[in-house]
Structure formats: structure tokens, C-alpha cells
Amino acid sequence: MNANEQKPQESLQESLQQVQRLIARHKLVEGLVHKQDMPKHDLVETLVHRQNLVELQQKLEQLHPADIAHILEALPVDERLLVWDMVKADRDGDILLEVSDAVRETLLAHMDSDEILAAAEQLDADEIADLAPDLPQAIVHELMDSLDKEEREQVQSALSYDEHQVGGMMDFEMVTIRDDVTLEVVLRYLRRFDELPNHTDKLFVVDKAEKLKGILPIKRLLVNDPDKSVAEIMAQDMVTFHPEEDAGDAAQAFERYDLISAPVIDRGGKLIGRLTVDMMVDVIREETENEMLNLAGLREDEDLFSSVWASAKNRWPWLAINICTAFVASRVIGAFENTISSLVALSTLMTIVAGIGGNTGNQTSTLIIRGLALNQINASNARRLIIKELGIALLNGLVWGSVMGFIAWLLYKQVSLGLVMMAAMVLNFQVAALVGIFVPLTMHKMGRDPAFGSSVLLTATTDSMGFFIFLGLATAFLL
């Protein structure tokens, strides 16, 4: 079965399971043969080893590099390296580009210099620039020496930008034409290509100085009279990007304008590259994954099957913060020991106040993080947004505080306890809303990911303040 004929999600999971079964069978058979005492044992063991791995290699040959990358990321390190050794050398470069940074580091450590160089030499200039930061410097220098002048300049240009900038992601393969030729000439020119660059939905119209003048969509080229000139039908109202722009902003523009490709120009208007939709999909996916990890205070590049020591160290910083905040919460409770001992009902109700406050804050912070990611929040509308969220928190606090106050009255037959419960929830909802707003905004102001640790800080604050507000009110009005 051809890799292009596979159904994306179902076949990918099936392929992973098939590879895992082949590896398990390989280990089982080799273990049995190794224990047997027979003539020419070493020869038999070698033959069985090769026979078992042939089927695995054939399976891998049917898969797209992106599918192999997914399988590598889903396997423990020993099995990952076994599969990596089965991949044909001419596919190494494409697969290295698809895997995560942490897994790529594992694979590169398993390769010698010649293997890395051979894999990198098969890539285009923009792909080499993507891979270069993870390669040893000696190999990068040797690789640059092997490129022709144009490719070397392209790689150096891409490397001069940060990986999260448009310039660090742009593709140099594109088709350019002049505006003073006819469509017939353009069609004859295109027929000279063995194949067009991927995601070519438009041609870029430039002058002699390579300055961008417009774009010629392929659909216009095909449906118009061949005798017309490019200048007559080209579009001049186009979306362009500069290499210094943020790749995340570019990805949002691709989504907003339904782009497949777009030109990248320098400040002088010269065409220097293009962005394509496949790159932007990768940016969106990576930003989503990073945001999920940052919410829990995890690093972006942790390997799922990294060592226990490495994974544990990755989680230490926020665990340490959690311990500190938990200690603060415990001291808050400890300060009201006399209150709790006098009215035991408080010990069962105070966790409700803290827990629901945390949920409210998470809702607010999620909304703020999304607004910041979509560039919908700025200085002019932030104040109105804060007032709105505080209003929502007040309304929810009154409604659900009344519900919980009524339940507390039913359980313990004390009107005053119900009123304290309601007041504590109203106040803690306000605290949760403020924290849910200002933690992401502060992170954003500091140039950090707004999601980074937001969930951890939010929960810690609402827990401590929830206990303090509830027990403080109980002390003041119940005792």
C-alpha cells in the first residue's frame, strides 16, 4: 500500500501498532534462538536476526517520513534506535526535520559524522537551516563548504533570523516571472520544470532588480487568453511578509486570508523567499502543544521517553513553587486553628470555596491567553475587559455563592454560616478573576508565553486566598 493512500489518523495508529508488534516478535524470537544450543549457533542467530528485521524494514519503506517521525516519538529509546537503524539513509534528513527537538537530539547522538552529513546534504537550503542549530559545528562547517554559492547564501540568510521569525522559516524554492511577457510564454516556461515547488498556487512577478510587483495565481493563468500579458491579469493587492515578523502572526494571517503561499520581501521590496501553508500548520501545532505544556509549567521539548532523571529535573522548578505555595496555604489554615476547632463544619466547606475559585480563574485565564494569542487584547481594550471579567465573577459569585450558602444552611442549620459561605465565594471569585487576568498579561508584558505556569500560579493563589477569606470571615462573624 502506498503511503499516500493511507487514511491519516486510523492508519497512523495501525502502523504504530504493527511496528510495535514486529519489534516484540523480533525480541521474542531472538531471545528463544539465543537460548538454543545448536551447531553453527552464531550463523543461525544472524540469519534469524536479519529475517525478522526485513519485514520491519519493508513496513517502514511504505510510510511517509512524517509517519515514521510519529512512530519514533511514540517508542522507548531502545526500540526507537532499532527502528531508526532500519530506515534507509536517503530518508534520514526528511525524518529528522519531522521529529521533535528532543527526539532529534537522541537520533543525532546515535549517528556518526558521515551519516549526519549524508542526511543533511539531501535537504534544501531552508531545510538545512532548520536542522543546522542541532548539528555539531564541525559538521555545519563541512556541510556549508559542500554547498554552491547560492545555497550557502540562502542558508546563511535563514540562519541570521530567529527560528520563530518569518525569515527563519521561509522557503527559497519559488517561481518568478516578469510582467512584460504573455501568458503563453509563462506556460512554456513552466513546462520546462520537471515539477513545480510544493504548494505553488501562484507565481511571483518581479522586475529586473527582483522587486516584487505582483502575483499571478495559477487559476488566472489557466483560464485567461494566452495572448494576454502578465501585467494585465496579475494581482497587486497581495499579502506580503517581512523576515523580521513573528511566525505566529504570519500563521494567523494564513488562517485569516486562507493563504496557501505568500511572498517574503525585505524593506526595499525585494523578493527573498516565500511562506507556505505546511510551515504555518506546523507553527500553529507547535504553539498549541507548547501552550498546553506551559500551562503546567513543563518545558517545550521534553521527550516522552527520556530518562527518569531528565524528566524529573524538568518538573522540579514548578514542583518547588507548588511546595512553597502549599506551605503558604497550610500556614493560612494553621492561623485559624482555633476557629476550625470551634466550628468543625468549616473544615469541610473551605475546600469548596478554594476549588470553585480556582475553576473560575482558569476560565478567565484561558480566555485571556486565547485573546493574547490572537492579538485581540491591547492597551485600549484591556481596561474594559478587566471590568467585564470582574462583573462576570461578581454575578457568578452571587448566584453560586447563594446556592452553596443555601446548601450550607440545610446541612448545618446556621443562617450565618450560609451567609459567610456566600460572601467568601463572591470575594474569592473576584480574586480568581483578577489573578486569571493579570498573570497572563504580566507574562506577556515580560516577553514570556502567557500560558507559562499560569495554571500553577492561579491554583496556588486561589487556594490560599480562598482559605484566608472564608476562615477570616468565619472568625469575624461566627465566633
Image: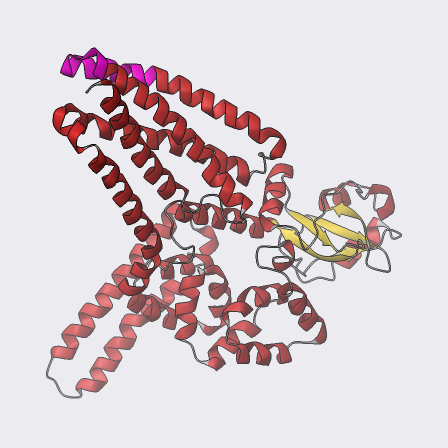
Q: Residue most toward the right?
A: 180
Relative depth, front residue between 219 and 156: 156
Instruction: Verify whether residue 413 appears in magenta.
Output: yes
Q: Quadrant of the C terminus?
A: top left
Quadrant in the picture for residue 364: top left
**x and y percentages locating residue 68 in the rendered image:** 41, 60
Left or right, 267 with reference to 159: right
Residue drawn where x is 58% and y is 34% of the image: 376
Left or right, 459 with reference to 123: left
Relative depth, front residue between 4 and 277: 277
Relative depth, front residue between 448 and 181: 448
Q: Is residue 113 above or below residue 466?
A: below
**x and y percentages locating residue 412 in the rendered image:** 14, 16
Q: Quadrant of the N terminus?
A: bottom left
**x and y percentages locating residue 312 in the rendered image:** 29, 59
Residue drawn where x is 57% and y is 31% of the image: 382
Q: Residue most toward the left?
A: 37
**Colouring method of the image:** secondary structure
Quadrant in the picture for residue 223: top right
Instruction: Verify whether residue 234 appears in magenta.
Output: no
Residue drawn where x is 31% and y is 23% of the image: 424
- Judged by its main secondary structure, the magenta piece is helix
Quadrant in the picture for residue 51: bottom left
Residue drawn where x is 48% and y is 38% of the image: 369
Magenta residues (range):
399-417
Q: Is residue 122 visible?
A: yes
| Count of picture labels | 0
Q: Is residue 228 visible?
A: no
